[in-house]
Image (tube, rainbow, N blue to C red):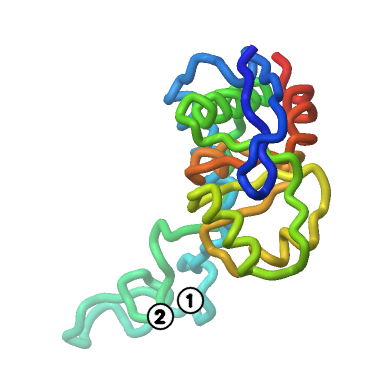
Amino acid sequence: MAVIDVYNLNKEKVSQIELRDDIFNVAIKKHLLHEVITSQLLQRRAGSASVKGRSEVRGSGRKLWRQKGTGRARVGAASSPTRRGGGVVFGPVPRSYSRKVSRKVRRSALRMALTDKLQNDRLVVVQDFDLPEIKTRKFLEVMEEFQVRKALIVTDEKNERLEKSSRNVPWVKILRCEGLNTYDLIRHEHLFMVQSVVPKIQEALVP
């Protein structure tokens, strides 16, 4: 098992914790990560784009003028796609973009993303993230202490002082351990985990 240091908010080592090799030291398969991340992004699409076809455009179906004798080109109904205000040909209709990925594959991708953070020294385990007060400045001081930007912070329960202190910092995201996902892990450069979160993640991701 790998052993990683546990720090307090002043970046002082306070203890160590063991990490399971079958979760934090697995083979990384890029194609599998790509599949899971693509699935997550597709599920975010609303799929609500819609236009009216010629049968849905409001208007008479009467022929605009007679076929012959006017000197003009022949026409049909005003809803024809070739006319202004007519229907749209092959336009978008409401649809679902979701692409299903099995639970086994999603969990495997999470293990790979966690392995990537550990192997690249971008995983930080802190004893707790209890800030003394709700102050963005206090939160930024902690981030500067660890020399970190673009961080994902995973907590085990609601932490009002942390969440409110960081909500104006665009390069930080706070997640509960239940919401941990591959896209956010890959998207953020560093991963902070509260010490009490580690056993829960390991229990949830046991192969």
Q: Earlier in the sequence, mark 1 or mark 2?
A: 1
The spot of residue 117 in percent (x, y) is: 52, 31
| Residue ID at (68%, 66%) | 165
What whole-number distance in Å separates the C-alpha atoms at marks 1 and 2? 14 Å
SS at badge 1: loop
Q: Nearer the viewer, residue 196 or 3?
A: 3
According to the picture, the residue beneath numbered tag 2 turns out to be 85
Residue 135 visible in this rendered orientation of the protein: yes
Q: Relative to residue 98, is residue 82 drawn left or right?
A: left
Residue 45 visible in this rendered orientation of the protein: no
Location of residue 71 by image quarter:
bottom left
| Residue ID at (50%, 49%) | 148
Q: Are marks 1 and 2 in contact (CB under 8 Å)?
A: no
Q: Nearer the viewer, residue 122 or 14?
A: 14
Q: Relative to residue 61, is residue 139 drawn left or right?
A: right
Q: Nearer the viewer, residue 74 or 134?
A: 134
Q: Relative to residue 136, is residue 83 drawn left or right?
A: left
In the depicted structure, whether residue 98 falls above or below residue 15: below
In the depicted structure, whether residue 26 falls above or below residue 82: above
According to the picture, the residue beneath numbered tag 1 turns out to be 61
| Residue ID at (64%, 12%) | 1
Report crowding for label 1: few under 14, some 14 to 19, many 20 or more residues within 10 A (C-alpha).
few
Residue kind at label 2, given as amino acid type:
Gly
The spot of residue 39 in percent (x, y) is: 55, 38
SS at badge 2: loop
Report crowding for label 2: few under 14, some 14 to 19, many 20 or more residues within 10 A (C-alpha).
some
The spot of residue 18 in percent (x, y) is: 69, 19
In the depicted structure, whether residue 136 falls above or below residue 174: below
Location of residue 184 by image quarter:
top right
Q: Spot the residue most to the left.
A: 71
Q: Which mark is residue 173?
A: none
Nearer the observer: mark 1 or 2; the answer is: 2
